[in-house]
Image: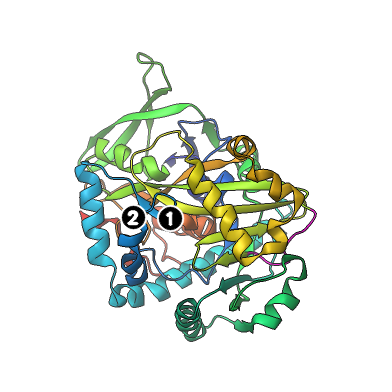
Amino acid sequence: MRAIVIGGGVIGLSAAYFLREEGWEVVVLEKGDLTNGCSFGNMGYLSPSHFEPLASPGIVKQGLWWMLRTESPFYIRPSLDWRLFDWGFKFMRAATPAHVERCARPLADLLLLSKAETKQWAESGLFDFEYTERGCVLWYNTPEGEKSEAATARRAEELGLKITVLNREQARALEPDAQMEVRGGVLYHDDAHLYPNALMQQLPRVLERRGVRVLCNSEVVGFVGSNGAIDAVCYRPVGVADAEERLPADIVVLAAGSWSPQVARLCGEYLPMMPGKGYSVTVDAPERTLRHPCILKEAKVALTPWRARLRIGSTLEIGHMDDRIRLRRVQSILRAVGQYLPGIAADPKVCALQDADVLLQRAWFGYRPLSADGMPYIGFGRRSHNLIIATGHAMLGVSLAAGTGRVVAELATGKPTSVDVTPFDPKRYS
């Protein structure tokens, strides 16, 4: 039995791993070269604490103000594209307290499954991606931020997660190099982190050693189907118009990230999604660093320390894809670090990023696939009974990758799934 996985990002490669484990012959089709996908600039979080979907009342409440500021954490670039209107309408409609409540348990379950599977990878001897269990801290600087995070922390405890609330003095003791200027924070002990660049470099090699074919620079251009099933996937080398080839398929997995809607349309499926451009910058061998990954709540900025580097990232810029780095947005990320963590901002290598030319050279961006309600799409398509859709993971690609891969393999094989996939059903918008 052959499975064709469309997309060589962390979700597609994870699906390929577990499908191969279940005995499938697996071919991965990736239109790029696997050197700089969305997960390469990811913060590397494995975050059971991130059980609230992006579509939430808090985002909508701040959204109108943020959308007026091009340097804000959440910015929608104006466009007359009907897909943006459709996505925005569905997003606003979904962003209710009831939606957040419904999503919390399913997301937490999938996040915990994914963390457990990733930990098994780390302990298998096949990988070395700096898997570390130190939790993640949400730092806040305002009374409103404190109140909001306290509510999230209470919900986390109800879901069985372990938390510790920290005051200003405890914050400074926890991160002495950072010279903290915060009101307080919440340490989510169940979170872990890894170095995603190493994971993304090692996964393809592990797959190929296990017999998975990974075809890079291969763009899907169509499907051949009959009787409600996909019989073959048509692809060609990127940039070559007259070299189309076909791969017979028993199962097709669509995991093409932000490019998934275009591929889905080729087989009659509709996925309301938009790409969300995110930025990060990585500092090699910083003189001052953090002991724990953290998120600066009001600024929506994340920081991750590894053995020899520190990554700072943020923002969602929603709109058409382009290759432009908007310097003001990246500069706003660094300003936020100075407001919360002046010790980190004073590190000479972080200070060097104040130079616009240096920052432009060091800044990275990637596109997060944003579903219309903040929940991933994981499940069978509507028109083809052998199409499994696995996309729309937004900022949680690495966090949810191994769990999604496990579930995809269970769906393909007809086994009961490790978690309830009903809340992730792609047909909710068909």
281 lies left or right of 90: right
Give the camera-side residue of 173 and 424.
Answer: 173
Q: Secondary structure at mark 2?
A: loop
Q: Please tell me whether the stretch drawn in magenta is mainly helix, strand or loop.
A: loop
Q: Residue at x 25, y 45 (%)?
A: 384
Q: Quadrant of residue 51?
A: bottom left
Q: Amino acid at mark 2?
A: Met
- Outermost residue, right direction? 287
Per the image, the residue denoted by label 1 is: 72
Q: Secondary structure at mark 1?
A: loop
Per the image, the residue denoted by label 2 is: 67
Q: How many marks?
A: 2
Magenta residue check for 323: no
**Is residue 19 at least partly visible in the picture?**
no
Residue 4 position, x and y percent, is 42, 39
238 lies left or right of 229: right
Residue 55 position, x and y percent, is 34, 64
Q: Quadrant of residue 307?
A: bottom right
Please tell me whether residue 105 is drawn above or below residue 198 in the rendered image: below
Residue 91 position, x and y percent, is 27, 60
Q: Residue at x 50, y 63 (%)?
A: 299
Give the extent of the magenta segment.
Answer: 287-293
